[in-house]
Amino acid sequence: MSQLSGAPLLVGAVAYTPNVVPIWEGIRDYFDTPDTAMDFVLFSNYGRLVDALRAGMIDIAWNTNLAYARSVLQTDGHVRALAMRDTDAAFSTVFVAAAGSGWSGPGDIGSRRLALGSADSAHAAILPLHYLRAAGIDVEHMQLKRFDSDIGKHGDTGRSELDAIDAVLAGDADVAAIGITVWENIGRGDLMPGTLEQVWQTEKYSHCMFTALDTLPESVSAPWVAKLLAMDWEVPAHRRILELEGLTRWVEPHLDGYTGLFEAIAQQGVDSRW
Amino acid sequence: MVVMALMRIVEQLAEGDTAQFAVASASELELVRRWCAKTGNTVVSTMMVEQDAGHVTVGRGRPRDPATMIPADRMPGARLWLYTNFHCNLACDYCCVASSPKTDPRLLGIETIETLVVEAAAWGVRELYLTGGEPFLLPDIDAIVRACVGQLPTTLLTNGMLFRGLGLRKLRAMPREGFALQISVDSSTAEVHDSHRGAGSWKRALAGIRVALDEGFTVRVAATISAHDDPALDELHALFDGLGIPRADQVIRPIALQGVADEGVTFSRESLIPEVTVTAEGIYWHPVAALDADALVSRQILPLAPSLDLVSDLFAKQWSSMTAASAMFACA
Ligand code: SF4
């Protein structure tokens, strides 16, 4: 339990939009039974969130995939994954180009100017390169255009992906690597008719994860996780939170979806902090 | 690229906050609606100055309380519309209540109006709107206006063509404080206006505006724009500016597909933020749908409070279960 003894379970998250406050107040209010009572604390970046988890300042961190991987690496694996969004269990990166390009597959990306999002965004910078390399592309010699906005927030704000799309629309890049959620939010291009088309999509991988140290007793985490998984899209009060947080239901951890990320971190020498 | 603007701006708004976006076509407005439906955000209002161009206000998320997004003066029950009568000296081709000289007047009557406005004020209505038909065809319109203004700020919608003789005397007998006239002018030159509203009507409407201004009244102007006409909005605003009418008092909106209109924007009860409307035939959801059986709230006009409560409740339920967005349609 966190060092604030006697206090309810303390969950840490990163403040990447003003809505993080209503989201977490809604989640806190939802955990209304004595065995699941919780409070939350917000950090300005994922580096500090992982520090706080390791230091025992918080019981559970709402981690991005990169923050989860760093929690694992920095504790020699002494963490436990608790739950994720349904959208996190089937995340992917989509490569998009101007409509009419006719390009398809990684081979058509390798020779083109590629716009990437924030360097600490797994889905918009780290994994796109990893999966291109895995597909046989010589990424060392690719022309990359990076949009390193909002560093520390692991791409949560989505701004760097929009910058990458704008670069394609302006003709400053040929292809942009974006997360599937941004692609879905523009209706896979349907909501921007005649402007973008998909060139390639990576395999599915895992994204955000509620993470605890393995010292958090199962008797404490289990009721909390059970209550989390019981949130129901059909209940308007729950739905409001689920919509703001971008999911339809919470699910059990899918850990095999992190294999690619651990490989990418090692290969690319990704900084162990931020 | 309205969707890129939505992605950048709305996603960073706090829940309940709103931002306004320009849309240049009906299909772009549709994209905004679809994006909001997809991303769990809310189209709060559309202010289309033409059939398919204008502004759309988008709110972040779907707050439990619509009052965080909808301005207080547009919340259900803030405005009460009274159709004083349905007959008119004109027979405009887009009239949303099919008025003409031959239309059955269906008078609301001053006694009913007096009772209604007292109840409205007690309930919490903030503003009254008198419309028709042409209210200046009523011999007691000045007394009706005084009864309303005695309770709440009041706007009278008129075609402005009857400010002569008896009509002028009635106008002069109306209060200057707490009262405004809203006069219809659809175009900057006579041609378009007259093609919908009848030969000579533009000239007389403009003369009416000048009379009302000279008499010291607050005058707002309202233009109804057909998709088939060149809206020439700059010229229209220049005309209104030249009359000394502030931009905030220049209402421009498309034709609504109601009444005798054979074109126009369509609404359903679910897609309109209600503005409770009383006619001799009953209480309706919105003044643009005062003949529409689907928009009928109650056949019983008095007491008024139950209908105001009912509309507020229905809207609150509609809001909380909302997947389609509600929109304001500017009659005034
Ligand atoms: S639009 Fe107004 S002026 Fe024209 S017929 Fe209808 S009520 Fe009369």
Image: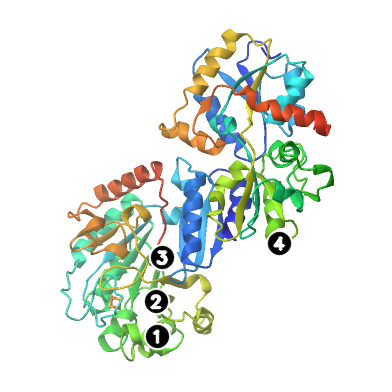
Q: Which dot marks residue B226? A: 2
**Can you identify the residue that label 3 sits on?**
B330
The CA distance from mark 3 to mark 1 is 21 Å
**Front-most of A101 and B79?**
A101
Foreground mark, 3 or 1, reads: 1
The CA distance from mark 1 to mark 4 is 41 Å
At label 1, counting other C-alpha atoms closer than 10 Å, the crowd grade (few under 14, some 14-19, many 20 or more) is some
Amino acid at the residue labelled 4: Ala
Q: Is residue B14 left or right of residue B25?
A: right
Q: Are marks 2 and 1 on the same chain?
A: yes
Ligand 1 shows up in which quadrant of the image? bottom left
Q: Which dot marks residue A170? A: 4
**Front-most of A156 and B218?**
A156
Amino acid at the residue labelled 1: Val
- Colour scheme used in the picture? rainbow
The CA distance from mark 4 to mark 2 is 36 Å
Task: Indicate which disc, 2 or 1, sits on the residue closer to the N terminus.
Answer: 1
Task: Indicate which disc, 3 or 2, sits on the residue closer to the N terminus.
Answer: 2
User: Which SS class for mark 1?
Assistant: helix
Q: Which dot marks residue B192? A: 1
